[in-house]
Image: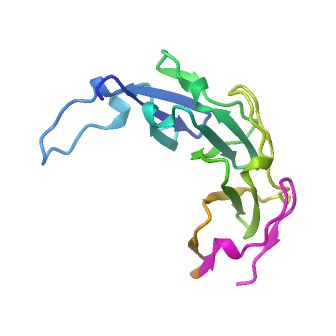
Amino acid sequence: MNTDRICLFTDTGVLHQIKIFDIPAGRLKDKGQPIDNLGNYSSSGEQIAGLFPAGYLKGHRMLFTTEQGMIKQVAAEEFDVTRRTVAATKLADNDKVLCVKKIEQEQELILRTQEGVFLRFPIAEVPEKKKGAVGVRGIQLGAKDKVEECYLLTGEEEAIVYKEKKISLSRIKPAGREEKGTKLRI
């Protein structure tokens, strides 16, 4: 609908909203317009961590994951604001939002670090926080390690390619939140 908004979450912990009505209509072969020109988002200092239509989020929860292993659930209703730019999450020093995903209660979360450590645990172990909170630790990281990717398991067989090898995510041993995880032998 033309009254809806696009929610753009960035790695700096900011939510930018763009009204659908402000997006210019174009023809089929037009190149389009940069998203920088439509709102307050600036691609020179921020990277996109999640992009959702606002109507798609109603009644759901969002999962925030940072590079330093902090995670939290936030009710999507907290992002139903009239301002174009608001703080979506609080971050520690030298931390970035890695990904923002819409979640279901029965899913499992898998965190993968730079050094190849995987940790799988139920999403129910992640507490729901307000958008102004930092979150809780999801994984214990090594001294120079950081979270590189997060995956949501829905129950069916899912596979990824890691270091040129196909890995089935459902074969990763389940553990608890805030553990060290397991390093896969590849």
Q: Is residue 120 above or below residue 164?
A: above
Q: Is residue 31 left or right of residue 88?
A: left
Q: Is residue 42 visible?
A: no
Q: Which residues are magenta?
A: 166-186
Percent position of residue 47, x then y: 51, 43
The quarter holding residue 35 reads top left
Q: Quadrant of residue 41?
A: top left
Determine the residue positioned at 64% across, 57% down. 150
| Residue 148 vertical position relative to residue 89 in the rendered view, above or below | below
Residue 85 against residue 64 in the figure, above or below? above
Q: Is residue 24 left or right of residue 166?
A: left
Q: Nearer the viewer, residue 48 or 101?
A: 101
Using the image as rendered, state which of residue 3 and residue 111 is in the foreground: 3
Residue at x 75% of width, y 32% of height: 129
Q: Residue at x 66, y 58 (%)?
A: 148
Residue closest to the eye, 3 or 66: 3
Image point 46% across, 41% down: which residue?
Answer: 51
Q: Is residue 117 left or right of residue 18?
A: right
Query: Where, quadrant-wise, is the N terminus in this rendering?
Result: top left
Q: Does residue 181 appear left or right of residue 96 in this picture?
A: right
Residue 159 x, y percent position in the rendering: 57, 73
Q: Is residue 117 magenta?
A: no
Which image quadrant is residue 24 in?
A: top left
